[in-house]
Amino acid sequence: EPEVTQTPSHQVTQMGQEVILRCVPISNHLYFYWYRQILGQKVEFLVSFYNNEISEKSEIFDDQFSVERPDGSNFTLKIRSTKLEDSAMYFCASRENTIYFGEGSWLTVV
Amino acid sequence: DAKTTQPPSMDCAEGRAANLPCNHSTISGNEYVYWYRQIHSQGPQYIIHGLKNNETNEMASLIITEDRKSSTLILPHATLRDTAVYYCIVRPSLYNQGGKLIFGQGTELSVKP
C-alpha cells in the first residue's frame, strides 16, 4: 500500500538553527499538508500546498516557516531559526480524495 | 474550530464491539463525517468516512443518524492494537478542494484484556 514517508524520524537541534523536514508524498497525490503536534496536545494544521504554491496556512505558520517542492517528488518544511516551542512532532500528509499521513518527524529544540 | 463533540475516553473489552459516538449537530448538507485514529503519537490513520448512508470497510463501520446530527464508529471485534485516540472530523468533501482536516481532542479508547 502506498504511503507517505518522512525523514528524519527524529532530529535534535540547537535553538536558532535551521531545520529542514522532508516528506515524500504518495506519488499520484496533488495536495500536500504539514501538521504538527506538541507533546500531549492535539494535531494542528500548519499549511496546505497545491500546484506549487501555498493554498492555505494557519496562524502558526509564520515567517519562520516555509514549504517547498524542490524536485517534483519531495515536499519540505523549513524552520529558519528554531525556538524551544517548535519542539513537536511534525506530520506530512498528502491526498487525492482522502488525506493520508506520514509517521512524523520528532523535532527537539534544545 | 472542531465542529464535533466526543467523549474524552472510553474502555472496551478485547473481542467486544467498540462503539464510539460523535455529535455533529451543526453539520451542513455538503459535509462528510471522517474518522481517523492515532496510535501512540504515530501519524493519524484514516479509518472511514460517510455522508448520509452507513458505511463499512475492512476496519470499521460508520452509522450516521437520519438527521445526520450524530454518528457512531463501530470496531466490531476490538483488539489491544485498537487502543488509540479516535477523531471524528466534519468537513466538506475533499475531492478537488484544497481543504484541511481540523482535529479536536478525540476519544481515547482503551481496549482491555
Image: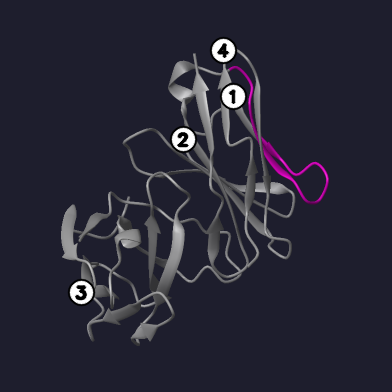
**Which mark is in front, 4 or 3?**
3
The quadrant of the rendering that contains the N terminus of chain A is: bottom right
Tag 1 residue: A64
Q: CA distance from mark 2 to mark 3?
A: 42 Å
Crowdedness near tag 1: few (<14), some (14–19) or many (≥20) residues, C-alpha within 10 Å: few
First reached walking from the N terminus: tag 1 or tag 4: 4
Numbered disc in front, either 1 or 3:
3
- The residue closer to the viewer here, A37 or B68, is A37
Crowd rating for badge 3 (residues with CA inside 10 Å; few <14, some 14–19, many 20+): few
Residue under the image location 54 percent in, 29 percent down: A62
The answer to which image quadrant residue B14 occupies is: bottom left
Residue topped by disc 4: A14
Chain letter of mark 1 equals A
- Is B97 a magenta residue? no
Q: Residue under circle 3?
A: B16
In the image, what residue type sits under mark 4? Gln
Q: Which residues are magenta?
A: A67-81
Are labels 1 and 4 assigned to the same chain? yes
Q: Which residue in the structure is indicated by mark 2?
A: A59
Q: Secondary structure at mark 2?
A: loop
